[in-house]
Image (cartoon, rainbow, N blue to C red):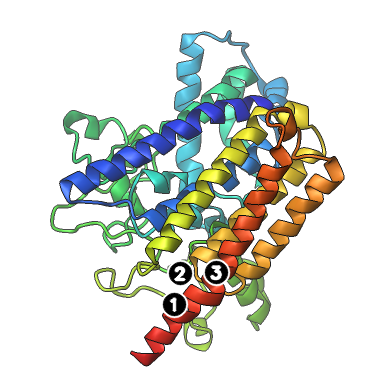
Amino acid sequence: MEEYGKILLIAMPLFFVLIVLEKIYGSYKGEDSVPIMDSVSSISSGITNAVKDVLGLSITFISYGWMVSKIAIFQLEANIITYLVAFVIIDFYGYWTHRIAHQVNFFWNKHAIHHSSEEFNLACALRQTVSSFVNLFTFLLIPAAIIGVPTAVIAITLPIQLFLQFWYHTKHIKKMGVLEHILVTPSHHRVHHAINPEYIDKNHSQIFIIWDKLFNTFQEELEAVPPVFGITRPAQTWNPIRINFQHLSLLISDAWRAENWKDKFTIWFKPTGWRPENFEEKYPVNKITNVYSFDKYGTEASSKLIYWSVTKVFITLLLVSFLFNNIGQIGLPAIFIYGLFIFITIYSYSELMDESRFAIYWETICFLFGLGIIYYFGDWFGFNSLFPFGNYIIIGYLLLSLAMAVYFVAYEFKTKNAILINV
């Protein structure tokens, strides 16, 4: 938990710098694929996922260590060969967990967030789930357990394999020659993120493209079919926490409304998108039918709201960095209280990004919760030890956030709506 937090302290600034460089490069080339509000939502999703993982908010029914103790035939040493073997097995594991997430209704809920951006850029790589609280697929690492790959090797290799999936989320790198036959490239992954009928549910591989070619899920990017990105039931929100549970909410509603008991049970295991007969007519949901003709979400935000959203996500990154850097000193149960504050903060400002009037209520909750933390602990989780006026800095930030929410909801959003009505 604490070790992973330290790794993220290095990775987060690197990812952030690369996202900024992609924005600058795209603007210079006249091909900007990094809208600011979309990127703020993506980074916010990455923060929620990182906090969930660092706090250990998930359960593994069958641990890899337990499997090794029961079925290992050999006992490998932790050397370069062992790490390479582990990397290949983890990539095989990643292919199948990824493919299952795309093809089974229930498991799509944990992965839809990653595809929810209607852009394709480095920031969207950070759109990762917080809705997956149970790991059911450790058994796919059985090949590693049988040959006795040490648990420590798996623990180190898993995040490395995950971080190596960041770079290919970009439109600026075209086809890469011979590497197209070996590795997952930006071209391959553009296909994977596309909602064009030709591209749906293709290219599930994560590092080595060989798995898609081996299991018949490969599709080359076609010059005549430019990829269109997003999900066919568009999220229509910048709020990463709401996006995480949209599909699950629909499944629960459909299961409840289904008259056939078989449908109530099987809907969870049917192919992704399946609904009981006639439900599309009885209980319609917004769905993209023409991938080349639909309005992207949230393209009319004011410059003030954009600048404030960037400010909020930057301050949240600083708060999260403080948590990750001091997780041992903060201790239990305070780290979970801190994590809850981060989740409420992200929910609050992403509701403001959606121009929702409820943002005031969420910001008020965040303000009172923050004051309650300072009152109960005496300071902000030891922040006063770094800055003598730490409490005043945090209280000032909370007050400013509440004031800005009031301004946007009570003035700017109402003014904008009045103009639209008059038009």
Q: Which residue appears at 62% of the width and 36% of the height? A: 138
Badge 1: few (under 14), some or many (20 or more) residues near its Cα, within 10 Å? few
Residue nearest the observer in this picture, 207 or 319: 319
Quadrant in the rendering for residue 294: bottom left
Residue under numbered circle 2: 236
Q: Secondary structure at mark 1?
A: loop
**Residue 354: x %, y % from top left:** 49, 68
**Cα separation between marks 2 and 3:** 23 Å
Towards the viewer: 5 or 359: 359
Give the mark toward the camera: 2 or 1.
Answer: 2
Q: Nearer the viewer, mark 2 or mark 3?
A: 3
Quadrant in which the N terminus is drawn = top right
Front residue of 273 and 310: 310
Which label was assigned to residue 63?
Answer: none
Q: Name the amino acid type tagged 1.
A: Asn
User: Residue visible at 41% across and 31% down?
Assistant: 164
Is any part of residue 85 visible from this angle?
A: yes
Vertical position of residue 82 compared to residue 154: above or below: above
Q: Which residue is mark 1?
A: 286
- Name the residue tied to disc 3: 407
Classify residue 326 by image quadrant. top right
Q: Mark 2 touching mark 1, by CB under 8 A?
A: yes
* Position of 227 relative to 249 (above/below): above
